[in-house]
Amino acid sequence: MFSRTVFASVVLLARVSLGYKQPIDYLEALEVLGTSYANPASVVDGLILSLLSVDVVGRVDATTTFVGQELNTEYLFGLFLQGADENTTQLIGTPHSVTVHSSVVDPPIAAVSYTSEMVSSTVNMTVPLQIDMFIAFDDDMKIVSYDAILRRIGEFMAYTAPYLAPQIAKEPNTTSTNVTELIELQTATDVCAVSTQYCTSDNQRYESHDMCMSFMTVLPFGKSWQGGMNTGWCRYIHKNMVKYRPEVHCPHIGPTGGDMCIDRDYVQVVDTNPFNKTLLAYNSSYNAADLKGVPASNVVELVKVQTEMVSMETVAFVRLVHLHEMSSPSILQSF
């Protein structure tokens, strides 16, 4: 038996439904996002309007959670732009082209899988990387929440490292042929170069370049999934953002790791929901605009009822039929 609260909510939905963006609008937004990955300068330099809301919260499984438009812009786009500007071999490739591999839209939520062709220019190599995302949009089609997964990032790094290592060996002029040692050396060299150049005065984190190298060469590089932990890999990711805001990012590549490259509890990471807008698609038979003005408790009840339905009828239709059968002035007057 459905509660009167749920029935009353459906009446409100039927009466004040405002409609929402069409699925094609979301598909176009996903295309724009993919294109922006391949042309990060357009976003970082403000050549196009930001795709992100001011209060966006994003999470990347291999790193951590980022809060706010500026921080997310730096990590989603500045990371690749800065790497592309370097003339040394980078462990993080540059997106050359990004293709929507698959997508599902249930406004205002979209799920998308991108294939990004990552270029390592110094070794003339291009390798695909799959990026899966759950995205929530606001009324202005700005991204307000996203949860990103770098699919098979471990395999990606294991595949590319042996190709990068011989070129890395030439740049610092080392005789080592050990892939792991060369990756760790490149990490220390690049992080300390950035620290020495940008982390000065109040932003200084190491007493000298030599002290930085001493610290970084003994710090474990880490696994591919430890890009948000106390590792060399995490500091390598963050070094690309230092030039944008040294006061924010210098701590991340320093000995303490700031609030980014730190030890994390696995259970806490999994159990924490950091988003400011749900990534739960309510129901394909009504949209987000239909739920405006409906109390949160009622929305919860609607979702509960929807998950219990097993008939082929749409949820809204079933509820309205029951409401018609059971409607009374007392129910309608509850508004």
Image: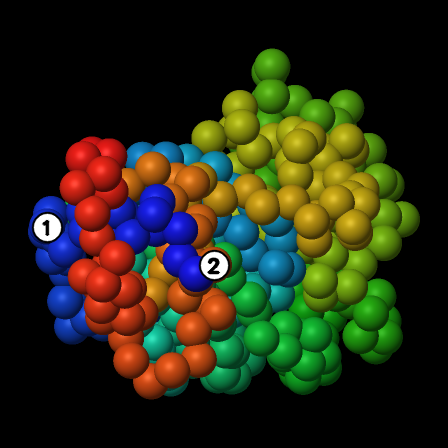
Q: Which residue is mark 2?
A: 304
Q: Nearer the viewer, residue 253 or 57?
A: 57
Q: Residue at x 16, y 72 (%)?
A: 24
Amino acid carrying label 2: it is Lys
Q: Position of residue 159 (x, y in %)?
A: 67, 84
Q: How many marks?
A: 2
Q: Position of residue 325 (x, y in %)?
A: 23, 63
Q: Is residue 316 among the parts visible in the rendering?
A: no
Q: Residue at x 85, y 54 (%)?
A: 220
Task: Please report whichever mark, 1 or 2, sits nearer to the chain's N-terminal start.
Answer: 1
Q: Secondary structure at mark 2?
A: helix
Q: Position of residue 191 (x, y in %)?
A: 66, 46
Q: Is residue 224 among the parts visible in the rendering?
A: yes
Looking at the rendered structure, which numbered label has been put on residue 93?
Answer: none
Mark 1–mark 2 CB contact (< 8 Å) = no
Apparent side of residue 273 relative to residue 76 in the rendered image (left or right): right
- Can you say which quadrant of the picture contains the N terminus? bottom left
Amino acid carrying label 1: it is Arg
- Can you say which quadrant of the picture contains the C terminus? top left
What is the quadrant of residue 40 in the picture?
A: bottom left
Question: With respect to residue 133, does 301 lie above or below?
Answer: above
Q: Nearer the viewer, residue 294 or 86?
A: 294
Q: Residue at x 80, y 45 (%)?
A: 265
Question: With respect to residue 333, does 43 lie above or below?
Answer: below
Q: Residue at x 53, y 51 (%)?
A: 59
Q: Which residue is mark 1?
A: 15
Apparent side of residue 165 relative to residue 123 in the rendered image (left or right): right
Disc 1 residue crowd, few under 14, some 14–19, many 20+, Cα 10 Å: few
Q: Secondary structure at mark 1?
A: helix
Disc 2 residue crowd, few under 14, some 14–19, many 20+, Cα 10 Å: few
